[in-house]
Structures are given as structure tokens and as C-alpha cells.
Amino acid sequence: MTQPVARAALLLLADGRFPAGGHAHSGGAEAAVRDGRIRDAAGLAEFCRGRLHTTGLVAAALAAAATTGFDPLALDEAADARTPSPALRAVSRRLGRQLLRAARAAWPDPALDQLAAARPRGAHQPVVLGSTARAAGLGPLDAAHVTAYESVSGPATAAVRLLSLDPFHAASVLARLAPDIDAVAEAAADAGVRTRGEGAAALPATSAPLLDLAAEHHATWPVRLFAS
């Protein structure tokens, strides 16, 4: 059972106001809106569900594994291998660098200092999130839940700005996805614990090629509301 202090840390880490830089990113929603794949709450729900069960699962498993004693640099290499889009690799490392800055201020820990020294240009965000969760006294399921939730909350928040979508409708999308978020977090946490003896290569590697292609296209836009 999560202790009260750790539970507070979990809420802080999942709070969109935590200065980790996620507010500047749409998680692919901006490109999906431009392409007509998100037009309303129903389209947002389908987009978020697809993202959650693909890249969301991968990220959540990496984050969970980082709390269990996996070598974070090996996980960082695994994250690189699971992110074929150069644009998304750059985004993930940028977000990781920002999160690590905030994490080291909030939960000082030698392991976070070592990760920052080893990856001065930024480690992948899920690896940093899992390392942060460990420093904050959280476990694999906690890290997986935060990461799975982030994979859908970012696009939902962005859709409110991109489509002038009713915030109540965006919130309802997230509420209806709650069972999926729980299931993905549990599967990711199980993978993060179970594969510790097998190595990072055994972690989930589901992909979303359309997200990769859209990210590359989005990176070329001269004018955009979000960084990704």
C-alpha cells in the first residue's frame, strides 16, 4: 500500500502544473486535428485510446522498469530503439531534460544527478519519470499510472485549445478512458517488474507509425501552436 507521503508525491508528479514542460506539447493532437482525424470528442477519444495502447504502453513500461533497479542508461537506449521518429526522439529528450531539472529540485537524489551527468542533453522522458518516481518513493505501478495518464491527458488538454472543445467534454473523454488507463498501467508495471532479469529488450515495443509520420510532418510547420 502506498504510504501517505508517497501518495502526495504521486499527485504532484501527475499534476499538469508540475514544471516538466508538458504543457507545450500536444502529444500528436495538433497534427491529428490538422489532418481531420480529431474533429470532436469522439475523435479525441479514439485518438487517445490508440495512443494509450501503443506508445503509452511502451512509455509506461519504461517508466515502471526505471523504478525497479534497471540500468537507466540501458532503458534510455531501449527508448531510443522504440522511437523511430527523430522528431519524437528529440521531443522526448527535451521533456526528459526539463523533468529532470524539476525532479532534482523536488526530490534530490544521487541517482538523478548521475543520470543528468550521463545524459547532459536529456534522457528520454519516460526513463526520467520512472527514475524520479523511484527517488520520490513511488513504485512501478505508480510510475506506470502517471505515464499512462500523461499519454492521454496531454492530447485532451491540447484539443481544448485546438478545437475550442468544451473542457467538460474533454474531461469526459478521460473519465471514460479510466479503465483503459488502469489496464495499461497494470500491464506496463507487470512488464517492468517481470522483465528485470531478461533485460530492456524484453519490454513492450508496440508502435504507432501514423504518430511517427505525423510528428515528422509537424516538425516542418513554420507556424504551430505546440512544439509537438
Image (cartoon, rainbow, N blue to C red):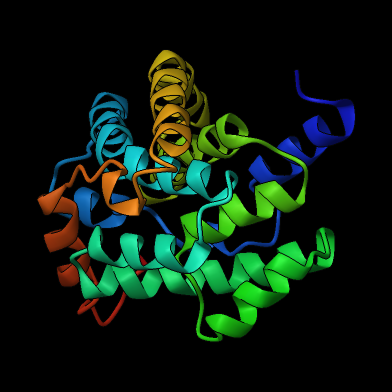
Q: Is residue 135 above or below residue 165?
A: below
Q: Nearer the viewer, residue 102 or 186?
A: 186
Position of residue 2 in the picture relative to residue 26 (left or right): right
Residue 226 seen anywhere in this rendered image of the structure: no
Residue under the image location 51 percent in, 25 percent down: 171
Whether 99 is drawn above or below 202: the answer is below
Residue that extends furthest to the right in the rendered view of this protein: 5
183 displayed left or right of 129: left
Using the rendered view, name the quadrant where residue 3 is placed. top right
Which image quarter is the C terminus in?
A: bottom left
* Residue 145 percent coordinates (x, y): 54, 32
Q: Left or right: 58 with respect to 158?
A: left
Q: Nearer the viewer, residue 22 or 85?
A: 85
Towards the viewer: 213 or 36: 213
Name the residue located 44 percent from the left edge and 43 percent from the top edge: 196
Report the residue that reaches farthest toward the front. Answer: 197
- Where's residue 50, x and y in %? 23, 33
Look at the image and tell me whether residue 174 can be seen: yes
Question: Left of 60 or right of it: where is 48?
Answer: left
Residue at 66% in and 76% down: 114
How far across and how far down the image is residue 224, in percent? Answer: 33, 71
Q: Is residue 152 above or below residue 158?
A: above
Residue 66 lies, in percent from the top left, at 54, 51
Number of numbered callouts drawn:
0
- The residue positioned 83% from the left and 65% from the top of the image is 108
Q: Please tell me which residue lies in front, 74 or 220.
A: 74
